[in-house]
């Protein structure tokens, strides 16, 4: 039997809460990978027991056969150092590129017998704190086998620009502080869940939605003018259409999506639509089933994003999988997904100008304020959008042809296809040479013993000799028992307690006691031995003797 191939992560991928592109994408990716099933085992190291139980429940619902064969292991992160030392891991993949890749690389370098690839994926890239987070990537712990997976070509350039800016600003030598590779793999879509409706299903969907013979343009996005897109330019484009040669049967705009705000501007948009004579339907927080109905009932998907918070455009894949032509801004990842004049129409976007004042204020401001300021410096061309709307509204054949081409182009975006590209990436990364061992400590990790060593009055080096206390003697004789807090199981080497109590029957200097404990219990290391002494001293199993 060959070596067991283990894929691992620090993230559950299946998350509860609002329906966002990030949560949908993470769940879709893991489903695709587990359906593809290219590895012998899938390990998840999560932050708490509650998170472990929640993931086990979700995996049992989604992938029961995988659990039945014992292909999934879920444990808390406290088990990670020992697991890395015990087993070879083929690759680690994280559901977000922010915060943890560099620290995981340090732990890998310190505990693992091999340098496995660590990859992580981008989502939004424009939050002000992300400069600090990407700085963590520039680390002596990073290896040539580590990579950030950008979901769009534009996103890949943003990540590289972060690294260039940080390296220049901090004067970081690329040899001493290497950066991860940046690879481009898009997100995917569930091609079974998103499929073009038949004519009868389409008529039923339009009837249920209350539409007539008008051309229905669907906007599905977060309903917030400071993220994803500004809706006012959309209405201005429809105003141009209605003032010109509007289609005889008319047009309708549908705004749908998640919102966390009571006042996100709905009333103003409805007033404006009424003033220009535009039928407007608004659907807040639609369920998944309702979202599918809206796709089925629409004629055109409209997504003129003009906000840096957008990076990829998952709804564009969903719409095209449903057989809809797309009008989108020629912006960030959108241009990867829409083939102009083939599957839809791209509308020019212009910006950003100088941002010096915003740059200075962003770290001191709320992110939604910063995104709003920047979005007002990004303009989707309203006349071009109006032309695209009028063109597709007036040509049912063109809509049909573009929609058919859009659906046929989605085969390469199935989640299984995207998971396959990741598997190929992990294999390529494993083949790359590692010219030198990476550092086993991240420069942003806190060396607690060095930084806080002055807090206590004594260290083990300066402590008087240690000896069994009265309670320690009772525990040694089996007349009493120590109390171990929940969560410390597997962290403190409790198997060393008995040898320690035996050794401490006579006073010994702390470091000498540590040395003898390690000889008596060779499975523990120096740090564990010292931790055990201090725990026993804390819980009155040991006491300080006289010098």
Image (cartoon, helix red, strand yellow):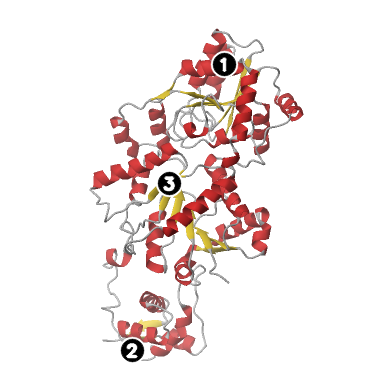
Q: Is residue 376 left or right of residue 360?
A: right
Q: Which residue is mark 3?
A: 183
Q: Earlier in the sequence, mark 1 or mark 3?
A: 3
| Residue 200 position in % (x across, y down) | 76, 28
**Alpha-carbon neighbours of circle 1 within 10 Å: few (<14), some, or many (≥20)?**
some
Residue 379 appears in the picture as rendered: no
Front position among marks 1 and 2: 1
Q: Do residues under tags 2 and 3 come within 8 Å of each other at their CB atoms?
A: no
**How far apart are the two marked residues, 2 and 3, measured between alpha carbons?**
59 Å
- Label 1 SS: helix
Q: Is residue 428 above or below residue 219?
A: below
Q: Earlier in the sequence, mark 2 or mark 3?
A: 3
Q: Is residue 410 above or below residue 86?
A: above
- The disc placed on residue 507 is 2
Q: Which residue is mark 1?
A: 391
Residue 212 appears in the picture as rendered: yes
Instruction: Report the residue that reaches farthest toward the right.
Output: 200
Quarter of the image with the N terminus in it: bottom right
Q: Earlier in the sequence, mark 1 or mark 2?
A: 1
Q: Is residue 435 above or below residue 335?
A: below
| Residue 16 position in % (x across, y down) | 58, 47
Quarter of the image with the C terminus in it: bottom left
467, 519: nearer the viewer: 519
> Which of the 4 quarters of the picture holds residue 248?
top right
Q: Do residues under tags 1 and 2 come within 8 Å of each other at their CB atoms?
A: no
| Residue 501 position in % (x across, y down) | 43, 86
- Label 2 SS: loop
| Residue 470 position in % (x across, y down) | 42, 86
**Alpha-carbon neighbours of circle 3 within 10 Å: few (<14), some, or many (≥20)?**
some
């Amino acid at each position: 039997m060959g070596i067991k191939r283990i894929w691992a992560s620090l993230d559950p991928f299946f998350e509860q809460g609002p329906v966002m592109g990030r949560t949908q994408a993470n769940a879709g990716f893991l489903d695709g990978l587990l359906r593809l099933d290219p590895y012998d085992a899938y390990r998840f190291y999560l932050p708490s027991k509650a998170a472990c139980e929640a993931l086990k429940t979700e995996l049992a619902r989604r992938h029961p056969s995988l659990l039945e064969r014992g292909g999934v292991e879920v444990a808390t992160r406290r088990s990670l150092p020992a697991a890395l030392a015990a087993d070879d891991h083929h690759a680690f993949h994280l559901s977000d590129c922010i915060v943890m890749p560099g620290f995981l690389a340090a732990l890998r370098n310190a505990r693992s017998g091999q340098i496995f690839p660590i990859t992580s994926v981008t989502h939004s890239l424009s939050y002000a704190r992300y400069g600090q987070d990407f700085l963590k990537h520039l680390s002596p712990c990073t290896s040539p086998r580590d990579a950030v997976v950008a979901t769009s070509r534009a996103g890949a350039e943003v990540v590289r620009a972060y690294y260039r800016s940080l390296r220049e600003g901090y004067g970081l030598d690329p040899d001493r502080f290497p950066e991860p590779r940046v690879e481009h793999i898009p997100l995917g879509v569930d091609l079974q869940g998103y499929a073009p409706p038949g004519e009868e299903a389409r008529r039923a969907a339009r009837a249920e939605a209350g539409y007539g013979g008008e051309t229905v343009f669907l906007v599905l996005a977060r309903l917030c003018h400071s993220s994803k897109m500004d809706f006012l330019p959309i209405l201005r484009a429809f105003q141009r259409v209605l003032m010109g040669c509007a289609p005889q049967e008319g047009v309708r705009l549908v705004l749908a999506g998640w919102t966390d705000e009571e006042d996100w501007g709905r009333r103003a948009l409805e007033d404006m639509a009424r003033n220009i004579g535009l039928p407007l339907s608004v659907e807040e927080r639609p369920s998944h089933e309702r979202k599918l109905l809206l796709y089925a009932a629409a004629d055109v998907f409209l997504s003129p994003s003009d906000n840096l918070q957008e990076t990829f455009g998952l709804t564009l894949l969903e719409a095209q999988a449903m057989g809809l032509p797309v009008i989108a801004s020629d912006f960030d990842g959108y241009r990867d997904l829409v083939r102009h004049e083939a599957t839809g129409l791209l509308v020019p976007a212009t910006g950003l100008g100088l941002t010096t004042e915003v740059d200075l204020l962003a770290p001191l401001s709320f992110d939604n304020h910063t995104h709003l300021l920047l979005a007002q410096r990004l303009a989707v061309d309203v006349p071009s959008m109006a032309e695209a709307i009028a063109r597709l509204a007036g040509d049912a054949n063109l809509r049909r042809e573009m929609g058919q081409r859009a659906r046929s182009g989605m085969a390469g975006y199935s989640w299984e296809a995207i998971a396959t590209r990741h598997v190929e990436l992990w294999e390529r990364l494993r083949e790359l040479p590692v010219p030198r061992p990476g550092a086993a400590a991240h420069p942003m990790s806190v060396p607690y013993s060095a930084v806080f060593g002055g807090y206590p009055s004594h260290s083990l080096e300066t402590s008087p000799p240690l000896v069994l206390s009265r309670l320690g003697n009772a525990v040694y004789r089996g007349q009493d028992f120590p109390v171990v807090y929940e969560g410390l199981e597997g962290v403190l080497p409790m198997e060393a307690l008995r040898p320690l109590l035996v050794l401490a029957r006579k006073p010994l200097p702390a470091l000498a006691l540590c040395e003898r404990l390690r000889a008596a219990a060779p499975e523990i290391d120096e740090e564990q031995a010292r931790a055990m002494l201090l725990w026993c001293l804390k819980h009155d199993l040991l006491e300080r003797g006289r010098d």
